[in-house]
Image (cartoon, rainbow, N blue to C red):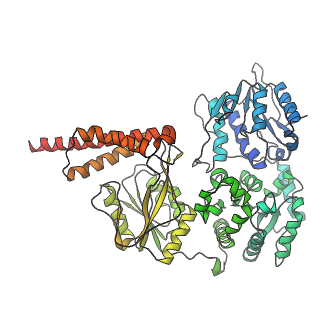
Amino acid sequence: MLEIKENTKQESSQNISRQKALILQNKYIGDVLTSSVIAENLKKIDPEIEVHFFCYRPAVAVLENNPYVDKIISFDEKKLKNISILNQYANEIHDLKYDLVLDPYAKLQSRFISLKSNAKRRISYNKPFFKHIYTDVVEKKEIPSRETSCTAVDNRVSLVNPLMKEPIPLALHPKIYLTQEEIEEGREILEKANIDFSRKTIMMGILGSGEEKSWPIDYMTKLIAHIQKHYNFNILFNYIPSQQSTVDKIKAGLPSLDKIYLEVMGKNVRELLKILYHCDAFVGNEGGGVNMSKALDVATFSIYSPHKFPNDWGCFEDGHKHVSVHFQDLDKPTIDKRTDKYLLKNAHKYYRKLSLTYVQAEVDKFLQGNFGDVGIPDEFSRDLPKISALLITYNEERNIQKFLDEAWYADEIIVVDSESTDRTAEIAKKHPKVKFITRKFDNFTSQKNFAIDQARNEWVTFFDADERISKSLIFEMIDEIKKNEADAFFVYRRFYFMEKYIKRSGWQNDKAIRLFKKSINRYGEGRLVHELIDSKGKVKFLTNKLDHYSYFSVEEYDRKLTQYSILRAKELYKKGLKPTIFHFWVKPWFRFVHHYILRLGILDGGEGYIISKLHAHHVFKRYLFLSKMWENNKKSKK
């Protein structure tokens, strides 16, 4: 039978019929903890609703005392794989008569329970073949929001959208609720171990679920020794008793156990949380420990498995308090070519490519950024060439902070702003490396060449604010600058429209020069829009790609294309072109066919059709603007 535990005191309300909701989220601690935000948002929408949570027993600890979960229904995960027991559980859920079932797990077992619950409303994700099990389905997001930085939270929060009659601010941060008594018990555990409370305390996630699913033990041992030597921190280990043999290997590889408190180890998940509450940071393999740390507001440094990605689970990573590293930071092209299953099967091979030197340097940056500088040996400092990062802006408050965070490789950042009316200037001016210049916009070529003239370094990057610059691309740029074998570099771009990756529609070979020497590279003066670098030196291609998160709505895309149409019309006017029926009808029609048929936009679904139609319409508008210019010229002569 299912085990049902009262989690909060329920106060019955007279004359109010309380609705009952069930959240289905078996599996791991991180999944259960992340799904707890659904409960909080259900209470925001309907404060009287009674919320139950269905999860496997080891994860119950992260839900205890949660004021938004009234009852916890737990089970043995292994038994759930038995069809007869699964059916028994589903019958028990049916008998509890839920009005609402939310299924963020969305696997075979939870689908079966959802269907058999007979709840009036059943909500999950829009997946082929299974969506008819539910009364409401939502689309899963592939691109994380700026607020969460991960789809794990975004997709779970989205499950309450069908229940909202009007938009309300929703909870995004999963939390763990410890009582004051539990907090004191955690401190007592540390006091008994003679922890030095004058020092910072770091818990290290030395292992994942197994040694083969962990960053290499020899790397981890050297990282621990490095922290032990150069930082005056208390060090705790996070692992489970069955991993003791691996812990013994790490102990044997350390020069000493100074400042390491091996006896401080939670006997269960709840006791671990009591201890973790008193830590200043969690450093180690990504997993439940990282998720619990974030829920307790403890700083985190996560080392990702090759088959798991920060876009999905890097919640609230800001490059400061919450930071992560992944093999893709060093070799994104390999990641792009491999499936998740292949990466999981060959995890040991790719884990080793996530080098100790890189991870150690990133850990140093994280620890020093949060807890102050210490003396680090020269071999661990990053030798960066002098680079100027250039950017032109107009109302880029949505993107500019991310751009500034990713421009850590530059020793100066030049922002040339076209009289923005939003918070672009306010955000940019706070950055210590930024030189902010306001200049009235005339055209893209002129604005960009002006920015080049302001750079003090020979090597410059010129990215757009809506382009995301991966660590792997940054390291490749640094390596190429050091080699000094070319003068300019093309970068291929992946195009995203309305939060969807557009693989075709004319964007499949999109590229632009983004790294170059300023002395022999300028934007050609003949173009007012779609400006191109005229290079007088050797040009090469970089391997890593940019993610171009260009437009989040049809209206935004339409406005930008209108701006391009006007500037292109000015170019054609200067060349003396007068539009004819051919330009108004044949060229727009051909543009649609080019994007939708020849460039396979038809395979991009509805978004492909929208993109093709917009481009065709704006070819027509280009010649309409051009026609009006000739009419105005004629009137002025009269």
Residue drawn 53% across and 45% down?
Answer: 499
Residue positioned most to the bottom: 378
- In the picture, measured across the screen, residue 353 lies left or right of residue 236, that is left
Q: Position of residue 214 (x, y in %)?
A: 76, 62
Examine the image and state in which quarter residue 473 appears: bottom right
The answer to whether residue 299 is visible is yes
Q: Quick check: 508 left or right of 333?
A: left
Give above or below for 595 relative to 419.
Answer: above
Q: Looking at the figure, which quarter contains the C terminus?
A: top left
Residue farthest to the left, as pictured: 638
Residue located 34% across and 42% down the image: 590
User: In the image, 105: left or right of 433?
Assistant: right
Q: Write the residue at 68% across / 37% down.
A: 41
Q: Residue furthest front?
A: 598
Q: Nearer the viewer, residue 18 or 154?
A: 154
When the figure is inspected, residue 110 is found, relative to residue 341, above or below; the finding is: above
Quadrant placement of the N terminus: top right
Residue 458 in percent (x, y) is at 41, 74
Q: Residue at x 85, y 51 (%)?
A: 270
